[in-house]
Amino acid sequence: MKEERIKIALQKSGRLTDHTLELLQKCGLVITKGKDKLIAYGENMPFDLLFVRDDDIPSLINDGLCHLGFVGLNVAMEKNIHFKSLSDNKPFSIEATLDFGQCRLSFAYPDEADIQSISDLEGKTVATSYPRIVSDYIDQQNLNINVTEFTGAVELAPSLGKSDAICDLISSGSTLRAHNLIEGEVVLESSAVIISANNQLSESKQQWVDKLLERIDGVLQVRESKYIMMHAPRDAIDKITALLPGSESPTIISLEGTDKMVALHMVCLEDVFWETLEGLKSEGASSILVVPVEKMLA
Ligand code: PRT
Ligand code: ZN
């Protein structure tokens, strides 16, 4: 019988590609690339990877050609608004929010124009690659602003006389500065997400998808997590755990020859900074060891 394979769509070449591949590899997936480099086959799990343009990922999911997709929330939402207007819409679900691809979709205004906020754009034109998200946002504000779709270098639209403002993705803000644009209202905070098709899978396929999503969750959780060991006064345990987010229920081990001091072992779900260690020390902790966590299964 032919083995059941599950198709995952990811960006072929762009900002999300390396992060996505690294995440899948940390989940234990070993892949071999096909000759055309458009597909890679999972060697140890029944997942095949399809390398495509990010804009095509939501349609591949909506059409049932791939089951999971790694894509920016901005792209997923733009396509979702489009799919909702179609009759054969089978909306996809967002399975996980990932810790890469962070950016925001914001309005930006030329610094010499007399525009301080979106309300000054009434009757004017905004250029964007996300016309549906932006139009919805403008409708919610009860404003009348023309939205013109611009693919490619949106930040050039005002200086080319194509628009009065733009609404584009921003991460560091340096592109805006280089084009004398000032950031205004944030329409969407985005990062990479995993979307999944809403079609029913066979039991065994669903088990594999659940396993992969569980491993992804585990990888995301441990990225910042630390395992912490220390000696501490027994009566300072509450204050010490309060200093370390996610470290409720520490393991408490008695120390030979003293009732007042104990050894504490715990997982902290966030990075531990020097300031926190200094705080622990001032609560009486000593011999503090902080080590990275490699894998965690909740
Ligand atoms: O070829 P394909 O269509 O697959 O790729 P693409 O060119 O459409 O996408 P790509 O690789 O540029 O981005 C993929 C995803 O990364 C986006 O959909 C976002 O979810 C996310 N992302 C995160 C960003 C940025 N940060 C980002 N800064 N996408 C684009 N930018 C661009 C932005 O459009 C602007 O031109 O970077 C510029 C601004 O950056 P700063 O740092 O100067 O503010
Ligand atoms: Zn794209």
Image (spheres, rainbow, N blue to C red):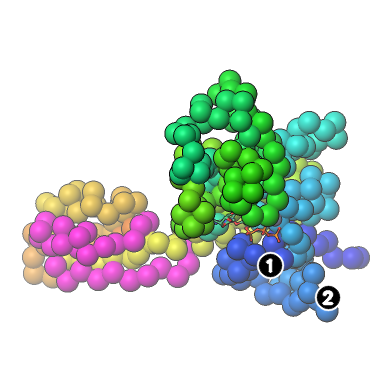
Identify the residue shown where x is 74% and y is 48%.
Answer: 58
- The residue carrying mark 2 has its beta carbon less than 8 Å from ligand 1: no
Q: Is residue 98 left or right of residue 200?
A: left
Identify the residue shown where x is 11% and y is 51%.
Answer: 235
Q: Is residue 152 left or right of residue 37?
A: left
- Vertical comparison of 136 with 178: above or below: above
For the residue labelled by badge 1, is the local secondary structure a helix, a strand or a loop? loop
Q: Nearer the viewer, residue 190 or 298?
A: 190
Q: Nearer the viewer, residue 200 or 17?
A: 17
- Vertical comparison of 231 with 237: above or below: below
Q: Which residue is mark 2?
A: 36
For the residue labelled by badge 2, is the local secondary structure a helix, a strand or a loop? loop
- Label 2 vs label 1: CA separation? 14 Å
Q: Which residue is mark 1?
A: 13
Looking at marks 2 and 1 on the same chain, the residue that comes earlier in the sequence is marked by 1
Q: Is residue 204 visible?
A: no
- The residue carrying mark 1 has its beta carbon less than 8 Å from ligand 1: yes
Q: Is residue 215 visible?
A: yes
Disc 1 residue type? Answer: Ser
- Vertical comparison of 91 with 204: above or below: above
Q: Assign the N terminus to one quadrant of the image.
A: bottom right
Q: Position of residue 271 (x, y in %)?
A: 34, 61
The quarter of the displayed image where residue 130 is located: top right
Q: Is residue 281 magenta?
A: yes
Identify the residue shown where x is 67% and y is 75%.
Answer: 30
Identify the residue shown where x is 35% and y is 57%.
Answer: 270
The image quadrant where one finds ligand 2 is bottom right
- Identify the magenta region: 269-298
Q: Nearer the viewer, residue 290 or 17?
A: 17
